[in-house]
Structure formats: structure tokens, C-alpha cells
């Protein structure tokens, strides 16, 4: 499968009065042409910083310590501001989570959606408005010709989000970055927007990086999933592999905390503790203090990625050939058994050994 984007060993820090915050620590992944890659994790895990680095939109106090970001053979970290200005909005576009902060209340919708066409395609006003009408209709804005003259406050929250999507799609970008695009919407409108994005992705054959903390959203949206914790990717795989056969204890915790129709308890399961202070990242596995399955080595040495399948890998010492065999939480075990019965062609067995926590 063709890679349209390749991120390798990306490290980003932020200079603060207290010291340097290591926000992204050696992140590597690729994005295939025409796929939806979801990046999930708690707030502060480095999801948005990673995508801001891709677009060259990091804050002034940010410092890229290492890494490469290759798009169409070009390392974006070495691109000039002028080159990035041409790429952003044309080849790579972003959908921001709050449409009211990304839409100018003093400009009509038609003018705002057509602006990227005037800048990047150098279209005439008439040509840009024709294309604007087409894309507004594409995202489901009814009576688009008349509504192009309206202002943001004259639209509902769901309609404003559709308009923001239209702005991102108007130039047919090769990569679309959606950063929590449905957070501010109620669940009914959220479902409509997610369905719309999935349909548009297929129709215009763009690749999407979908940022979210909500695993439930990912299930029906993504092709692959990357799980981030404390500035690192800890597990990556096809969506079925992550949901039905997760291997990292952090992924177990995220999935175990999701409510289901079978949930009987009045309290949802939660991951104990808090994320580490990235001013001084811990030695070894950053998740070890919150991990009930942690081994002694987790506090001493950072785990490498272990391949589960050709498409699935996780950075946990539990996948080492000599690691002890542990029993995941009941919900995870049920999902794994379902996966092994219906999806998996080969189940990796671990050889137990006497390792102390």
C-alpha cells in the first residue's frame, strides 16, 4: 500500500518557565493513501502536537528536537514558511473541533469557503463561488446558493461543522487532519458528521488523520488506530486488532472504561493514577506506575515494539517471548476470544517465566 505521509522519530518539546516539556517523544507512523488513521489517547498524550508539527503550526515556544515528516518526497520539517503556506490548505487541510472559533463572524459563509480557492488556485470570484456552491451541497447544506450569503451565527452547530468541513475539502486535499471534529456536538449530530466524513473520504479519495479521545467514535470510522500515551505511540494496528485483540495494558484500560450495552455496574472502570510529568519523563515504560501488570523491567527499561501481526505492534514487555502470561480484564479477554474465533488466523502464545513485579 502506498504511503502518502511518513513520520519518523518525531520529538517535540515546549520551553516553559519550569523547564522543557517533552510533549512528543520519538513518534513514528505512516499514513496510507485513501485510509483513515485514528490517533487516540488521553488529553496531553501528544496527539494534537503531532499533527500541528505536520502542518508546521506549532507554538513559538515549541522546539522540534528530532525526526522527519515526509510528504510527497519532501521533508516538511525542512520546508520554508512559503512552501508550508502553499501546502497547508491545498495539499494538507485541517478540520478544527470548534467551528465557532474557526469561522469569522464578520464574513459570509460563501466568502470564507471560497477563500482557499482564491489563494491557492487563483480562481476568479465567479469560479470560486461555483466551486463553493458545489462543496456546500456536497456536505449537505441545503439551498446552498442562498445560504452562501449568510453569516456563521445563522447556522446551527451541526451546520457550522459541515461548513468547516467544506472549507477543508474545497481544494481536494490529499490529507485531511480532523482534530476532535465532533467534540462540541450532541451525539445525534456527531453521528451525522462522522457518517458524512466517512462518505466524503471515499468519494474524494483523501487520507484522513482522525484525532480523538473517544474510542467509541473510532470503531466505525477508522481503518487503523494508533494509541498514544505520554508523548509516545504504544500500540498501532488495524481497527479490529485494536478493538478485539489489544495487547498493551493502556489500550486494555481505555477499552475497559468504555460503556457498553452489557455494562451492569453503575460505575465505569477507570485507569488508576495520572499521566506522568513530561517535564521529567520517567525511566522505562511511562505507563508502569498505572499498570497493574507491570514487570520489574518496566521501571528500568523502555519496551521496544513487538510485532503481533504484520499490521499490529505494541510496545509492552508482556509481548517478550520470555514474559509471564497474564490474564487481561474480563472485557478484554471476551473481545480477544471473539477475535480469535472470527478474525485471527494465528494466535501468538507467550511462554511464562518467573518474573517479579
Image (tube, rainbow, N blue to C red):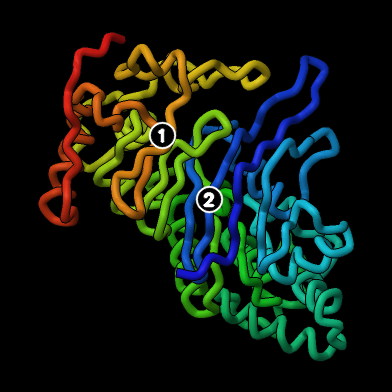
**Which residue in the protein does label 2 denote?**
29
Quadrant for residue 351, please give it: top left
Which x, y percent locates residue 133?
A: 69, 84
Locate residue 6, reporting x and y percent.
Answer: 59, 57
- Residue at the top extreme of this rendering: 356
CA distance separating discs 1 and 2: 14 Å
Farthest-out residue, front: 322
Residue drawn at (86%, 82%), measured in percent from left and top? Answer: 122
Which image quarter is the C terminus in?
top left
Instruction: Check the image and report above or below for 279 versus 192.
Output: above
Query: Residue 327: which disc?
Result: none
Q: Nearer the viewer, residue 146 or 49?
A: 49
Disc number for residue 315 = 1
At a point 25% along the width and 24% down the height, the residue shown is: 323
SS at mark 2 in the image: strand
Disc 1, SS = loop
From where the camera sits, is residue 155 visible?
no
Q: Is 68 on the left or on the right of 63, as rendered?
A: left
Q: Is residue 247 left or right of residue 130?
A: left
State left or right for residue 109 relative to residue 43: right
Q: Depth check: 175 or 261 in front?
A: 175
Q: Are marks 1 and 2 in contact (CB under 8 Å)?
A: no
Residue at 64% from the left image edge and 77% from the top image edge: 136
Q: Position of residue 129 (x, y in %)?
A: 77, 85
Q: At x 46% / y 46%, what residue is drawn?
A: 226
Amino acid at each position: 500500500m502506498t504511503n502518502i505521509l511518513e513520520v519518523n522519530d518525531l520529538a517535540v518539546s515546549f520551553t516553559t518557565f519550569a523547564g522543557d516539556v517533552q510533549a512528543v517523544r520519538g513518534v513514528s507512523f505512516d499514513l496510507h493513501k485513501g485510509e483513515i488513521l485514528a490517533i487516540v489517547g488521553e488529553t496531553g498524550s501528544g496527539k494534537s502536537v503531532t499533527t500541528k508539527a505536520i502542518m508546521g503550526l506549532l507554538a513559538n515556544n515549541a522546539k522540534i528536537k528530532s525526526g522527519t515528516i515526509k510528504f510527497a518526497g519532501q521533508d516538511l520539517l525542512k520546508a520554508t514558511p512559503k512552501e508550508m503556506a502553499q501546502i497547508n490548505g491545498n495539499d494538507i487541510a485541517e478540520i478544527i473541533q470548534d467551528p465557532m472559533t474557526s469561522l469569522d463572524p464578520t464574513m459570509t459563509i460563501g466568502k470564507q469557503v471560497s477563500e482557499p480557492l482564491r489563494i491557492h488556485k487563483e480562481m476568479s470570484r465567479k469560479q470560486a463561488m461555483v466551486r463553493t456552491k458545489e462543496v456546500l451541497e456536497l456536505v449537505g447544506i441545503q439551498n446552498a446558493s442562498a445560504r452562501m450569503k449568510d453569516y456563521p451565527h445563522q447556522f446551527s452547530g451541526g451546520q457550522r461543522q459541515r461548513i468547516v468541513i467544506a472549507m477543508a475539502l474545497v481544494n481536494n486535499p490529499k490529507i485531511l487532519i480532523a482534530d476532535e471534529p465532533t467534540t462540541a456536538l450532541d451525539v445525534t449530530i456527531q453521528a451525522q458528521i462522522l457518517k458524512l466524513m466517512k462518505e466524503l473520504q471515499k468519494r474524494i479519495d483523501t487520507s484522513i488523520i482522525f484525532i480523538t479521545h473517544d474510542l467509541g467514535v473510532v470503531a466505525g470510522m477508522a481503518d487503523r488506530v494508533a494509541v498514544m500515551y505520554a508523548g509516545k505511540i504504544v500500540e498501532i494496528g488495524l481497527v479490529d486488532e485494536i478493538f478485539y485483540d489489544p495487547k498493551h495494558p493502556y489500550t486494555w484500560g481505555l477499552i475497559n472504561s468504555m460503556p457498553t450495552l452489557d455494562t451492569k455496574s453503575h460505575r465505569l472502570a477507570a485507569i488508576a493514577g495520572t499521566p506522568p510529568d513530561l517535564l521529567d519523563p520517567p525511566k522505562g515504560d511511562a505507563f508502569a506506575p498505572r499498570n497493574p501488570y507491570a514487570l520489574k523491567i518496566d521501571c528500568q527499561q523502555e519496551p521496544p515494539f513487538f510485532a503481533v501481526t504484520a499490521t499490529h505492534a505494541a510496545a509492552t514487555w508482556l509481548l517478550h517471548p520470555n514474559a509471564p502470561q497474564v490474564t487481561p480484564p474480563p472485557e478484554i479477554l471476551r473481545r480477544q476470544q471473539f477475535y480469535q474465533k472470527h478474525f485471527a488466523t494465528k494466535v501468538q502464545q507467550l511462554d511464562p517465566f518467573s518474573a517479579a513485579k
